[in-house]
Amino acid sequence: MSGFVSLCRTVSAALLALAVVSTGTLTSSVAAAPASPDVTRGPSGLPLPRFVSLKSAKVNSRIGPGVNYAVDWMYMKPGLPMEIIQEYDNWRRVRDSDGAEGWINQSLLSGRRTGIVAPWQKGKKAQIGLMAEPGNSGGTVATIEPGVVGTIKVCNGDWCEMTFSGHTGWINQSLVWGVYPGETIKD
């Protein structure tokens, strides 16, 4: 038994020495590296969280990552934006605009960016102007009701150019669920 304890101490000391040497090397290489924004990446290599949209008109959201898990919710609208918050194999844990979470197979998700206009105002008598240009100085192209889904073309960090049923214009980015505050999207 004492031989085993001695071996454990020797291995522990060697690992500790290796850790100290590695830490010094790692610290100097990190200090020399240019600063980069902290981005959490999933197993796919893509950032988490991120927005995507539904490909199909009928998508099952499951309580776990696999077909053996029960269906918790069925989405019936293609193009609906979803926020991916976790990845496991070819399954993505998503969150919808109402905060409901579930697992959807990646083959049913698209990188096409869509957004929902002010879903937090659904059911209220709010009208949101779709502007001819970024800012409130241009004319109104259309009036959009809360909860309407549109395709995002471009976002500059403050305003997004979106298309709703053939009408294209600019909407304040803070009124869109499907894009992060300050996020830029290029066509």
Image: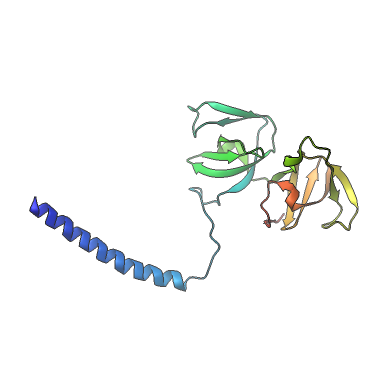
Residue at (72% x, 44% y) in the render: 115
Expressed as whole percent of the image width and height from the top left, the position of residue 24 reads 35, 70
Expressed as whole percent of the image width and height from the top left, the position of residue 17 reads 25, 66
Residue at (25% x, 61% y) in the render: 15
**Residue furthest front as drawn:** 124
Residue at (30% x, 69% y) in the render: 21
State the image quarter where residue 12 is shown: bottom left
Q: Is residue 32 left or right of residue 106?
A: left
**Residue furthest right as drawn:** 139
Q: How many marks?
A: 0
Expressed as whole percent of the image width and height from the top left, the position of residue 159 reads 77, 55
Q: Is residue 129 left or right of residue 89?
A: right
Expressed as whole percent of the image width and height from the top left, the position of residue 117 reads 76, 43
**Residue furthest left as drawn:** 2
- Residue 125 versus residue 147: which sits nearer the camera? 125
State the quadrant of the C terminus: bottom right
Q: What colour scheme has been applied to the protein in the rendered image?
A: rainbow
Q: Is residue 3 left or right of residue 44?
A: left
Q: Is residue 4 left or right of residue 92?
A: left
